[in-house]
Image: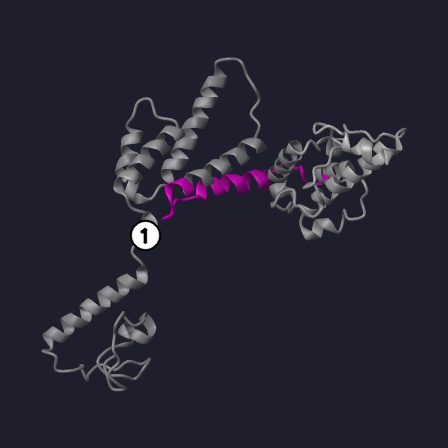
Amino acid sequence: MGEVTLITKLDFGDPLYLHPSDTSATPLITLKLKGTENYKIWSRSVLLALETKNKVGFVDGTCIKNTTDEVLSKQWDRCNSVVLSWLLGSIADELYHGQIFSENASTVWTELKETYDKIDGSVIFNVHHKINSLKQNGSSLSEYYHGLNALWKQYDSLVVIPTCVCAAATHIADHNKTLKLMQFLMGLDDCYVSVRSNLLLRDPLPDVKTAYAVVSREESHRGFSNKDTTPKPQTSAFIAQTSNQRFQNNNGHNKGPNTNLKCKKCSKLGHTIERCYEIIGYPPGFKRNGPNSSN
């Protein structure tokens, strides 16, 4: 009875306090640690989640187990087990098997950090390549910008520029702003050529947030989605094919298919293999007249 009374009196701000929702069955984060390539993002996500639950001390070692009070000692074991289960639940299966027999959350955290918190050229290259390869490609402007912004933040966490109080610090910051502006503008769809040109003519150049706001207003003004208005290649082929067929029928006064042409694909008369609907697809509403029809 004394144990229950003592545990229930733990303050919400005490690291040993466990909320009813703080169970091993509740995932801490949805992101899974795969290895070096996403350790930075994973560790940051875990620390943020643990901070909201006041459990960071169980991974950084600052929350020490009480060895003189049996009740608090057992409560520490419970909290450690919950945090440990959260960590194990947020790593990939191949990493899980190497940590399942660990008994201390801080030990697992330290081992994962020592193993995967490695910044080498390949990691930086991959992030930088994603930044320079990312294009809007018909997606919404918001989706494109926020995806690019996430990559920028990831890159900044990998490449730490030394702090400086001299005038060079301002020039470096301005250079980074210009670089991000150019990367953002280069990835925009071609329908924003005019607004992109206007932004590049400004003196001084705007920062990327201002540029995004200008382009966003342009998108709203147009009132359409690039994704919905991009013509589908197959539809274009159908339109061209239908128009070409109508032109041929008008010139031939609808006298029927040209018997001098025979398709090597379907063996029908009136067209060649380059125009065979069985290869390029039938246009909407097309009616097949029979085995001897031109298509």
Q: Note whether residue 73 is visible.
A: no
Residue 171: where, in percent of width, then height? 45, 19
Residue annotated with mark 1: 228
Quarter of the C terminus within the rendering: bottom left
Query: Residue placed at 26% from the left, 80% from the top?
Result: 288
Color theme of the render: one colour
Residue 124: where, in percent of width, then height? 56, 38
Q: Residue furthest top?
A: 166
Residue 279: where, in percent of width, then height? 33, 73
Quarter of the N terminus within the rendering: top right
Residue toward you, 45 or 166: 45
Q: Is residue 144 left or right of residue 272?
A: right
Q: Which residues are magenta?
A: 115-143
Q: Is residue 231 above or below residue 58?
A: below
Residue 131 lies in the magenta stretch: yes
Give amino acid for label 1. Answer: Asp
Query: Residue placed at 79% from the left, 40% from the top?
Result: 78
Q: Is residue 55 above or below residue 271?
A: above
Q: Note whether residue 74 is visible.
A: yes
